Image (cartoon, helix red, strand yellow):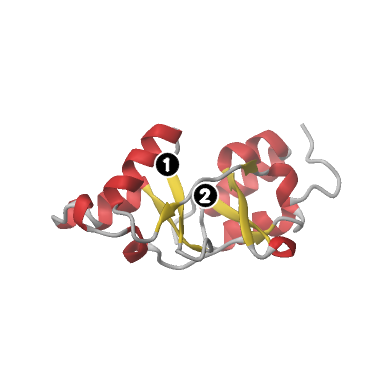
Amino acid sequence: MAAQQNMTARDAMTAGAQCVGERQTLLDACKMMRDLEVGAVPICGDDDRLKGLITDRDIVVDCCAEGRDPADVYAGEMAGELHWVDADADISECLNLMETHQIKRLPVIDVKDDHRLVGMISETDLAKNLTDDQLAEFVEHVYAPS
C-alpha cells in the first residue's frame, strides 16, 4: 500500500488522545494505559497543554526499577524531552522527527487551534499509511543502536 500523496499528520494520526495530568501519579498513568490499551499517554498541564509523554517502559525503568512507588511519583516528574508535530505537517516531517529522535510515538498538535493536542501517531498508524519501503526505513532508523 502506498502512502497517500500530500498525507498530513492529521490524516495518519489516531485522534482523541487522552492525557494524564502532570499532577496525577504514575499509578494513574498505568491505569489509564491499561484502560485505553495503549503503551504511552501524553502528559498535560493544568493549562491543558502538552508537557511530555510517558511510556510503560519509562514507568518500569525510571520508577519501579529504581525502587520508587508509582503511587508517589507525579507524571510531570517524568515529562522529559518533548517532541511533537503540527497536525498539518506532511507525513515525511513526522517520519523525520521519529527517525531522528528514535521515537515510536509522536503527539500531534493543532497550532491553529491554540496549540491543542489532537492525536498521536504510533507505529501502528505508520504501518497503515506508509509504503513497505517507507516503513522498513522507519524501522531501520528507530530500532538502530544509537
Question: For mark 2, what is the residue?
Answer: 104
Residue 84, given in percent of the width and then of the height, sits at 59, 61
- Residue lying at 86% horizontally and 45% vertically, measured from the top left: 5
Q: Residues within 10 Å of mark 2 (few under 14, many from 20)?
A: some
- Residue lying at 67% horizontally and 65% vertically, measured from the top left: 114
Residue 89, given in percent of the width and then of the height, sits at 75, 58
Residue 126 vs residue 76: left or right?
A: right
Q: Give the quadrant of the C terminus.
A: bottom left
Q: Identify which residue, 47 or 97, lies in the foreground.
A: 47
Residue 138 vs residue 78: left or right?
A: right
* SS assignment at label 2: loop
Residue 64 vs residue 1: left or right?
A: left
* Three-letter amino acid code of the residue under disc 1: Gly
In the image, residue 76 sits, relative to residue 15, either above or below, namely: below
- Residue lying at 31% horizontally and 46% vertically, measured from the top left: 28
* SS assignment at label 1: loop
Residue 37 vs residue 86: left or right?
A: left
Q: Which residue appears farthest toward the front when viewing the image?
A: 46
* Three-letter amino acid code of the residue under disc 2: Lys
Residue 53, given in percent of the width and then of the height, sits at 45, 56
Cα gap from disc 2 to disc 1, whole angstroms = 10 Å
In this view, the mark in front (2 or 1): 1
In the image, residue 71 sits, relative to residue 100, either above or below, namely: above
Q: Identify which residue, 69 or 124, lies in the foreground.
A: 69
**Rendering quarter of residue 129:** top right
- Residue lying at 52% horizontally and 61% vertically, measured from the top left: 48
Question: For mark 1, what is the residue?
Answer: 39
